[in-house]
Amino acid sequence: MSFLDRLRSSDADSVPATGLPSRALLWLVGSFALLLTPQWDRLPLWLIAACAVLASWRWLAQYGRVRLPGRWLKTGIMLILISVYAATVQGRFTVDTAASFFVLAVGLKWLETRTVRDFYVLFFILVYLATVNFLFHQEILWALVTFTGVALLLVGLQVLNAPELPAGMTSGWRRLGGLFLKTLPVVVLLFVFFPRMSPLWSVPLVSGEARTGISDTMRPGDISSLAQSSERAFRVTFGGEIPPYRDRYWRGLILDYLDGETWRQGQTEGFRPLGRVAVDGGVGPLESEEYDVLLEPTDQRWAFALENSRAVSDNVAEEMADLFRFRRPADSPVRYRLALEEDADSAEQARGADLRRYLQLPREGNPRARALAGELRRSMSDDQLIRSLMARFREQAYYYTLRPPAMPDNGIDTLLFDEKRGFCAHYAGATTFVLRAAGIPARVVVGYQGGEPGAGGDYLIVRQYDAHAWVEAYLDGRGWVRVDPTAAIAPERIESGLREAVAEEGSFLENDWASPQRYTDVPLVQWASLQLDRINYQWQRWVVGYQGQSQMDLMSRLPGGFGMRELGYLTAGIVGAGLLIAGLISALQMRRGERRDAFRRVVDTWHRLCATAGVPVRHGETPSVLASRLAKAEPAAADSARLFARMVNSHYYSAGKENDSGYQLKRMRRLLATMKRQLRRSNSRTGRRRD
Amino acid sequence: MKNLFRNRWHRWINRRIPRSDLQSFSQKNIFILPTGAGAVFGLLLFIMLLTGINYQNSLIYLSTFLLGAVFVGAMHQTHRNLSGLELTLVQPGEGFAGDDIPFRFRLKAGRDDAIAIMLSSEELGHAPVHVHSRQAQDVSLTVHSAHRGYLRPDRIRIETRFPFGLLKAWSWIRPVSAGVVFPRPVPAPEAFSTVEDGEESAEARSVDGNDHADIRPWREGDLSQRVLWKRFARTGQMVVADWEGEQGSPHWLDFNAYPGADHELRLSYLAFLVKERGRSGARFGLNLPGQIIEPDSGPAHVSRCLRVLATWGEERPRDAKAETHGTRRRRSGRSSQVIAEGQV
């Protein structure tokens, strides 16, 4: 650490307090602020406040306004913050809480950043904080923010290492930029070719907080609150035609057990140990029947799919009832690929035992709905029954509304016969109830319906407000058939989306002021938001989503078989070649630096000439000494040699030579030519004499 | 074992870096290694890579590669920071034993800026300096001295950790020129010179050194030699120059005046006296076995005397001693190469 001591004593006058240059610390503080922003929605408020206070404390201490806390105070602050943290997380251990603790640790470190060594420690943990950021946010904007934060850190290090360098900041940025540009090709190559292994061990990233999205229970009113969110649920690219709006039913999960007012899943999905499975979403160009979904994190294993789909990519599998499940929860954006099939399930025959649970109803409640079912049952076949129920929804004055009234007791009866105002969840629940009461196996399906085209129109964006609930009924010989009461009540919802369906009511996104989707009448906002989405989509598909299998696919298109091992060799080769090339370039530059000096070259030629004449240059000899030796050996060239030596001297040792250096150079070259001629002539003469 | 290794290492360095007052740094003699922070940075990159693998997170991969590339880029930067730089020992220092002796070096940057360059010898260092491309800057580095004599630092280390402090590039200069360390002054006991002033010298001194003597009227018993006859001829007054010492000559600082004392101690006494005389501006001469400096005064004389005291009995360090066979062979090889080139 003697070097550090030296460093500290060297700038002791400028920073008496802590021995760190203020400007370097400023960069670190700035970077910390920047690196915290991507996490602001995730972190508890008190933690952000604590971090701000701790960093400002350190900052003020730098200027001597306050003093850094002593050991006891520091321990006290640490204990208090850690116990607040412990109270907040309540023993949950997830990556989310671990990341919060990490942030807390960074905050506390500010109080003991006194030496250069502490500065480096802080640098390292801030770099890792940037890494942690990427676990939670991978959008291009947040990525840029995080990379900028890291760049600030690197500039800070430069300032630390040369604190009193004038214009250190701008030169620091320039140096960093140059470094970045020079190494960019290697970084890109590494990114493309570095073998993507499957995880070495698996830690769930499930965060404790609730995410916006559909859930596995449905109470009347649940989905209408979801309809107030314009967050993205997923984006889809189709290999072929984009299906028409009314066919865009994205099935997510099935709720088949009515528990009082709440619909639940009858069979809980079995616990699955986290596999070390590559989250890989399929590769290559999309076939015409295929489609590619990029799902935002849900922390769930549900994958949303159109009806009659089959899995194409490895990370999803079809499970019971035509639903698709991921092999591990979607804790970060997941891309998966499915394909549409022509009526594959038509022949499917469910066994009676399986169907029985789709007839389950509570023992009591909603007598009028049961009566309606009985009445319909008496006269009609299953098919007719469903049709007449839909006709009832269509013809009577049922309203589709985001502001449904509260229906506490016998909610289904109230909805069907009194209020007649509800949202899709209400109608889906009521329809299933009536169908079951009439003896037709039925179930509630929850998912999304719709999706608006993104910029360029080549993909769909499905948002949370597209969340939807509908019904599937089992008809003998036809299997499960989709029945959507909302389509009967508010066809605009199915044809063009929620916005149109509730246009009169004016309740679309009424609580979400900041959402660009609210301002579709302002073309610029709409355009900008869609363009941004497109950039993000491409970013997530090609950069964020670049995983093992996409890499393998890319490699398989290269000539020669590329396996994991070849990739390893290739990566090693790239790194090696990169280092070698960089070394060669710098060596060449150095060489060229020497060569560029024209005078030096002329002098070298002279030395060679002298050596040919039998007067090799001695180490440390001055030009005039060499000239006089040459003159002694070759009297014919004496004058020119002396003149040349004088010129060399005057070039190297006299001032004000820059203005006519070109002319002087020319003279020296001419003189050399003369000297050469003289030497040759004298040589031939002596040669003749020898003969 | 460890010693053996270290000796080999030093021999190898010495072969790579021959003694010279001028050293220019290039691939041949620059060493570069990660610092402690650099090693931790490597570990951090590894942890980041693990995180990226486990969470299948492409952006973590990307940032790992970016930072890794920055590290490699920093390697070139740090190297270039030193490479092309010329370090010259401009002036070896002088001083008293036990002090830190300042050596003046000149740094001349090549094509690239040389930023945050540090010179150090053993434990003494210099604050980092910045030399912009094609410019020169002087740096004064203190070298610790233990005893009198020639002071030639075995190696002066030049180091830089710019830009990130994750890597250090360093080299050495092994100067030929030596500084001079004067004996540490030790207050001398009363002593008298054993050198008798000859008649002439007394006469000469009395003429041009009047101000050093008290001039008083002649008293009975004064030696006639002491009478300033010239003044008598001019003014008719009999005056006598009363020199400071009665026996021997106070002008002579004498090595032999301290019988029984160690040689080094005698030199220290003399250094003390020289320094004292120098301060009062008195005339003095120096008598060392084998070396006599005639009395004189003035700062040049003082430093000459000090230098003689410093190097008495010492041998000037020679280049040949430091050079090993390897260097010599290489040098002869180079000159033969020149000839070969010339013949082509």
Image (cartoon, coloured by chain):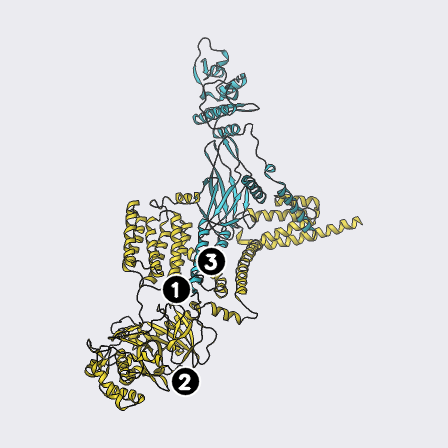
Helix, strand or loop at label 3? It is: helix
Few, some or many C-alpha atoms within 10 Å of disc 1 (few <14, some 14-19, many ≥20)?
A: some
Q: Looking at the image, which residue sits at the far bottom?
A: A379
Q: Which mark is residue A143?
A: 1
Q: Which mark is residue B68?
A: 3
Q: Looking at the image, which residue sits at the far front?
A: A353
| Residue plotted at (59% across, 38% down) | B322
Q: Is residue A12 above or below residue A207?
A: above
- Chain B colour is cyan
Could you tell me residue A282's position as x and y percent?
45, 73
* Quadrant housing the N terminus of chain A: top left
Could you tell me residue A252's position as x and y percent?
35, 75
User: In the rendered image, which quarter is residue A209 located in?
Assistant: bottom left
Q: Chain of mark 3?
A: B
Q: Looking at the image, which residue sits at the far top?
A: B220
Q: Decide if residue A508 is in sight here.
A: yes
Q: Residue under label 2, please give it.
A: A347
Q: Nearer the viewer, residue A56 or B299?
A: A56
